Amino acid sequence: MASGVTGQGMARQNKTDRLKDVHSQALRSFGLSFSATEDQRDVSMIDRKFHTVAGAQWDGAIGEQFKNRIKLEADGVHKQVKRAETEYRENRITVDFISKDGDEHDDLADLCDGLFRADAQDSQAEEAFDNAFIEGIGGGFAAWRMSTEYVDECDDDDDRQRITFEPIYEADQRVFFDPNAKRYDKSDAGFGFILTSMTPEAYELEYGEDPSSWPADVTKNWTGGFLWSRPDAVFIAEYFAIEEAKRTILKYTGITGETEKRVEADLTEDDEAELAARGFVLSGEKTVKVRQVHKYIMSGSRVLEDCGIIAGTEIPIVPFYGERAFIEGAEHWMGMVRKAKDMQRLKNMQLSMLASISASGGVDKPIFLPEQMAGNELYWQDDSVQNYAYLLINPVTDASGNPVAAGPVGMKTAPQVPQALAALLQVSDQYTADILGNQDQGDEYSANVSGKAIELVQTRLDRQVYLYMSNFAKSMKRCGAIWLAMARDVYVEKNRRVKVVDDQDQVEWDRINTQAVDSKLGMVAKNDMAEARFEVAVDVGATSSSARSATVRTLGSMLPLVADPSDQKVILATIGRNLEGEGIGGLREYFRKALVQMGVEEPTDNDKEEAAQVQTPEPGAQELYLMAEAEKSKANAIKAQADTAKAVADTEYTQARTAETLAGININQRDAALNAAMKLREAVPMPPQQGMSEGVDNG
């Protein structure tokens, strides 16, 4: 017993020492990543605040110079950022899985397409995508994450999982990658971090330790300048580390030659028994290198939790860059805002100065001596409101005391707008439009402008956004690759029923990891997710709603040009298939089935099942009577045919017996008997038989 306790104690000590090493290595790795991009992250946050937070455009030294003065924001940057966001929302980017080895797995690729869309729909992935796009075009860097969750967390017996897409807010302050990674999608990164902040009280309640008691090297932060513990916040990190391992793959062969593969480390006695019961025997094994992801949760002081190996072979963080470049070996990024900030600030300053000039008064003011205004101050003060017919001043007397008519002793002229200020206003507007695009050109069309000119203007506006859309397409491609790697580990249950969503946002159901009968190969695997190794492609196009509307318009304009009634029927059904509106889902489904019957659309598995289950309708009373009479007539005909056959058989039997008798008499007697038989046959003619002619002597 003591030996066992000692062994357990040594195992715990070994684990503790290993986690200490992991934590030390993780802190060093994080420090390198943080210090390499710290300046970029600060500027990125300023960019996001600049176009989002009211008053942020006056942060810094410029705001200090205009202290206690009018500070206006004529925000043209925010307008252009929102235009780019709208352009993205109208042209969603979709993931498409493509078979690497021909059409053998095309059905499985289509299933993965639908399963990806279903996971995205169920986890509200649009929130993650939209947040990443707006942060990326604003600050230059954004990200979202992917993880797994139980389908039913309240059911102890349900171990099924699904893949979720989750937003990472302020990713430029929360996501860190291996600084040695050079690829856009960070597929070459050896590690990644996601930071989460907590209040010190919440941290102490969750993990049972006071952050203020952490070692000095953590609070002083020897890891690159980042403070893991602050008076108002404590940071914890999800640490994802890529590990290389070896795995033995066992190959089993069935009675009919089909094969199945199992990982030796995951194979249980029950699995072996199940394979043996199905007639599978071990036919080979191979040791391969595998890539896996180890996840830890850590604070600045220690590893809080070892989460083990997670699903997939990729770090489940998808980065998105607005614009990206390497300068002197360091990674730099920016969005739409960075280059437009200076001109926007200049415009704000100019408009604020104009507002100050306007507020100070736009007319010349007379200057009087105090004795001229004594007693008349209120009249002059209220004149702008009361609009008096005239105003009074006191006379001025000379040295002898005689009144002298005198007007103002001087004039204060109204402030003038400097010429340089007016010129700079034009320059700043033009420069901002050059950087961000002039949306007014796309919104204000003259009646005499040709459609081609309008198209060119819109194309020029679209080009301002195309770079960001192209980069987001790269991110979506990475998202598809991560999902596919995770799906092979998550969707493993035999004959599991899964939800899929087609490209028209229609929900269907299918089964994965099933068996099917092949006429040549016997039992074969169907929808085997272990075989889901596809190329990932992306498509930048209109949203499903916009695409359907465009389809209806295009086909509607084409319909008058089509003369063939069959083609017209197809076009009309396709228009009905793509109609948009409240409560017409049933109508769209009707037209879809019509297109399936016409051979235009491929039938779904549900269509095939419904077709197989279609039964002949029950006949009515009259149909039943006619069917009964027909069966009766058929039975009588069969009976008559049977009686005829019996008569023929009896006749042939008689003839055979006659021949046998004739064989035993002399020739004269035989001839006499044959003549008698012929006369008898002529007197009683035989009915014709099928395949025989009347008058043919078979005897």
Image: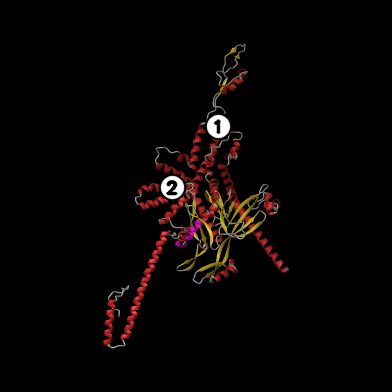
Task: Please rate how many residues cluster around mark 1, counting C-alpha atoms within 10 Å: few if below 14, some from 14 to 19, many from 20.
Answer: some
Image position, residue 688 (x, y; %): 31, 73
Q: Earlier in the sequence, mark 2 or mark 1?
A: 1
Q: Is residue 109 magenta?
A: yes
| Residue at x 40% of width, y 48% of height | 555
Dot 2 amino acid type: Ala
Task: Please rate how many residues cluster around mark 2, counting C-alpha atoms within 10 Å: few if below 14, some from 14 to 19, many from 20.
Answer: some
Q: Is residue 322 magenta?
A: no
Q: Quarter of the image for the C terminus: give it.
A: bottom left
Q: In the rendered view, does 484 fall on the left or right side of 229?
A: left
Q: Main secondary structure of the magenta part?
A: helix
Magenta span of residues:
101-115
Q: Please indicate, yes or no, whether residue 480 appears anywhere in the rendered image.
A: no
Name the secondary structure under disc 1: helix
C-beta proximity under 8 Å, tags 2 and 1: no
- Residue 606 lies, with reference to residue 68, above or below; the image says below
Look at mark 2 in the image and give the residue it sits on: 550
Name the secondary structure under disc 2: helix
Dot 1 amino acid type: Ala
Q: Nearer the viewer, residue 498 or 582?
A: 582
Image position, residue 685 (x, y; %): 29, 75
Residue 600 numbered tag: none
Q: How many angstroms separate mark 2 from mark 1 (CA)?
A: 47 Å
| Residue at x 50% of width, y 38% of height | 429
| Residue at x 42% of width, y 42% of height | 454
Query: In terms of image quadrants, where is residue 382?
Result: top right
Image position, residue 587 (x, y; %): 45, 50
Q: Nearer the viewer, residue 348 or 553?
A: 553
Look at mark 1 in the image and give the residue it sits on: 355
